[in-house]
Image (cartoon, coloured by chain):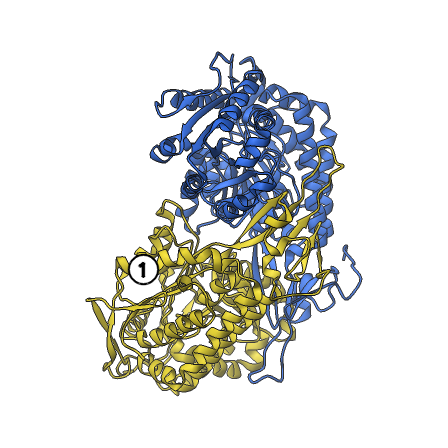
Chain colours: A blue, B yellow
Amino acid sequence: MIDGSILIGQGARRSDASFRAHDPATGAVVGPAFSIAGAQDVADACALAADAAGAFGSLAPAVRADFLEAVAQAIVAIGDILIETAMAETGLPRARLEGERGRTTGQLQLFASVVRRGDWLDATLDRAMPDRVPPRPALRRMNLPLGPVAVFGASNFPLAFSVAGGDTASALAAGCPVVVKGHSAHPGTGELVARAVQAAVAACGLPEGVFSYLPGKSHELGAALVADPRIRAVGFTGSRGGGLHLVDIARQRENPIPVYAEMSSVNPVIILPGALADRGIELAGAFSSSLTLGAGQFCTNPGTILAVDGPALDRFVAAAADALAGVEPATMLSAGIAAAYAEGVAALDGNSAVARASAAGAAGHNRCAPALFDTTAEAYARDASIGDEIFGSAAVVVRCRDLAQLAAVVAGMEGQLTATIHMDDGDLEAARALSPLLADKAGRLLVNGWPTGVEVTHAMVHGGPYPATSDSRSTSVGSLAIARFLRPVCFQNLPEAMLPPALRDANPWGLSRRIDGEWRAPAVAARPDA
Amino acid sequence: MIDGSILIGQGARRSDASFRAHDPATGAVVGPAFSIAGAQDVADACALAADAAGAFGSLAPAVRADFLEAVAQAIVAIGDILIETAMAETGLPRARLEGERGRTTGQLQLFASVVRRGDWLDATLDRAMPDRVPPRPALRRMNLPLGPVAVFGASNFPLAFSVAGGDTASALAAGCPVVVKGHSAHPGTGELVARAVQAAVAACGLPEGVFSYLPGKSHELGAALVADPRIRAVGFTGSRGGGLHLVDIARQRENPIPVYAEMSSVNPVIILPGALADRGIELAGAFSSSLTLGAGQFCTNPGTILAVDGPALDRFVAAAADALAGVEPATMLSAGIAAAYAEGVAALDGNSAVARASAAGAAGHNRCAPALFDTTAEAYARDASIGDEIFGSAAVVVRCRDLAQLAAVVAGMEGQLTATIHMDDGDLEAARALSPLLADKAGRLLVNGWPTGVEVTHAMVHGGPYPATSDSRSTSVGSLAIARFLRPVCFQNLPEAMLPPALRDANPWGLSRRIDGEWRAPAVAARPDA
């Protein structure tokens, strides 16, 4: 089932250049030699995607929804080999990967339901005013898909943010063909999922260009994909450097395109004085759990704790250090990630303005020993490197003189995916004062929770101001993610026979629509298969 | 009432550097010396805007709507001096400017009604699932304003796309303070309107930083404004070069921001064979009217006609040339625009692959003599310069061998604001075949109309793929324009007392909201002043 192929439409091909996958726990080679897709593969995949865009983008909602569900079923049908392959390639445990598979199929099903409902079309009709001087023509607007989307698989979610993950699911939901650049750390997992999507495309009788899969290890591959003139948008989750590189390529194209890059966040957690005094020890334990979940390899990992200095904070730090000492170092996703983590921790260890709060020790091959650091607001403000994201279970406690200084630290922070407040009833006034500032900095504001664990729902925002993402107006998790791949088009004075179904007077798709500014349920019964 | 001041918040100041306005019809100086805002003025305006952002952005919808209506009333209250000043500064006739004033106030009133309705908040609630394992917290999402917006007044709509035009109205509607860089071609008009907005801010008791006005002539002023770290988005209408320059500055910021630049479009008009044969002469007359409206100084001016070659097209071209010969050359907006127009026309006159179809002749001081050119699809494909926009009443007829070649010409075109089809019943099949291609190229597709005349409604899209705009996902006209200045934020597990009113269980603003994915009318009566 895994032979290292490049999958272009319904075809499979191999290249001379190849790379190997490794088990990060042992360093052992896993699986066959994987082909590295080249320039011709990129061009062929993009050409097929462009060919498919018109037909795929104009499918009735129910047909595209069925396809998304078929993809979910095909992923389930892969069976346990998917979990075993992902375990070997990523070092992640079975339970996590089984959960992630459920998240991946659940996300496809959520988008299927969203596509069926059709609100994302934003069908909007302004009726003609023939008696006005001059007469007003009928104006109708709906969202159309942007066209072929390039998706970059993320290392840290080999299922939920990789080949058929959130970016792919939302782009397909929008009606955009997808060309995936697979992540080189889990190519076998990627190929299994890609073959499942390929099978679903065939089973649903869709044009083959709806999906292609380009495995590879080189930066050239990703660059060529983003530069291809047929690609109309990009979804990426990864490092700031990687994301900004793609943003630059996209901008230098003859026709610049949007890049949705989710890049960097230290996810500040503010523990207000009441909560710190009342339940600092309990919070320290929960913090340790959140920080070390999945070896800290989450974009929403709580990397910065902000609190007012004092004995209660001393107790919190000590308790957190204790809790972290009890966490067994976990295998990281790849040797490269483990090395980058060790480098980040070593930099803070070598920073005289930062104290090590947790015990240091050998972690073992590619493993992540949790690390907690302790510094002051003054030092944090002076040395921006203290606030740099370290991908893994490392965090910095920033001791503030008072709430005013704490607010100043927040004001000086970069954009974030999340910001969290821990509070008791007595902290309400302080929390209310901070929350507008936090909402301006982050895509998601939490109270009395931990940022890891991103629900896939309608209200979720997994996004945020730069550099958390390259586009604060978007989310990469939740049903709103579909909006990234749509653009509005107005149709003026078109005869019924030329209008897209969503905008016809007869409303054959049974959509809710905005009529003269007011959102209205369908006047006719839904006939979703029309 | 016009003294050439820089208006920062509620203040007025002057600078040593100044410039003069000129009547384009005569070259005569109009009005006083106008101050040129400098770096300190930019910084002061942006600082005030940032100070005002929180309070202004969290106003109840009804309060912000009242403010928009107060701006409209204040513009009306300026009286005829506004029309007279604009006439002198732009050369546009009274009727056009009176109409444009109505459009400007109508646009503010439309946004007031949109703000009141509150759908733009996209209030979305996913209810908690306490019994799920693990429990799901309550998740709520709404749109928040991006923050201070820089607006560049456009030369060609001194009212409707300038100081209190569409960009300003939509940014204010979204809850973003606005700093306007006034256009140097109509500084007196700009100051009058800016003073009206300033008065409305005071009358409504809003923070003064909600609005500032920076007159000037230098590129440095605009560059400094876009580079200011407190500016969060930019609205611009103008040349491709100008727009791309601002895009570059915005990208090079420490925190890159979106630029909504509406730049360049030749607005292809396709006359299908049936329509050409049946009513080519009539269409030629209507085309001449659309091309010369306002001296052709519209972004939606029909600059390219595509049709299948033959005697019917010969008749159309001859009739259009005749009609254009009867149009008196009109004064253009400025000496610079008139010079650029003359240069563009001269380039086509000097292009051996293009024939002049209309009579050439002296136009008079800063006037626009309409110009119609005639070329082939082959020449058009070979020489991209033939397709360059000429701002003014110039158009090129592209003769195609057949409909397949016509479609190929369309496929080769850049992104457009509009695309138009003229058709009869017999052209339906051809029109249906072309329309997906056109919808992929343009923000608005019209049938049997002319692209000039952009209705300000809910369904309007004045936007389109690059280079029509820098962001095809947006419109700068119509109620959807508000979406450009918003970003979604998720609130997880916040107590009712900390939630923004739009997301509280009590729904004090009486909003329609999306509950667990379904859009629902308010459960409680609207209390818009709460």
- Measured as percent of width and height from the top left, residue A284 is found at 57, 26
User: Which residue is depicted at the point 32% across and 75% down?
Assistant: B186
Q: Is residue A201 visible?
A: no
User: Which residue is depicted at the point 34% across and 74% down?
Assistant: B191
User: Which residue is depicted at the point 47% across and 70% down?
Assistant: B204
Examine the image and state in which quarter residue B11 appears: bottom left
Q: Nearer the viewer, residue A437 or A187?
A: A437
Q: Nearer the viewer, residue B492 or A114?
A: B492
If the image is split into quadrants, where does the C terminus of chain A sit?
Answer: bottom right
Q: Amino acid at mark 1?
A: Gly
Q: Is residue A10 visible?
A: yes
Q: Is residue B2 left or right of residue A440?
A: left
Q: Nearer the viewer, residue B372 or B262?
A: B262
Mark 1 residue crowding within 10 angstroms, few (<14) / some (14–19) / many (20+): many
Residue at which label 1 appears: B222
Q: Nearer the viewer, residue A405 or B226?
A: A405
In this figure, what is the number of numbered marks?
A: 1
Please identify the residue farthest to the left as the structure is shown.
B16
- Measured as percent of width and height from the top left, residue A132 is found at 59, 83
Examine the image and state in which quarter residue B155 appears: bottom left
- Measured as percent of width and height from the top left, residue B339 is found at 27, 72
User: Which residue is depicted at the point 73% across and 32% down?
Assistant: B133
Q: Is residue B513 left or right of residue A136?
A: right
- Measured as percent of width and height from the top left, residue B111 is found at 54, 69
Please identify the residue farthest to the right as the structure is shown.
A525
If the image is split into quadrants, where does the N terminus of chain A sit?
Answer: top right
Q: Chain of mark 1?
A: B
Disc 1 on helix, strand or loop?
A: helix
Q: Is residue B83 left or right of residue A421?
A: left
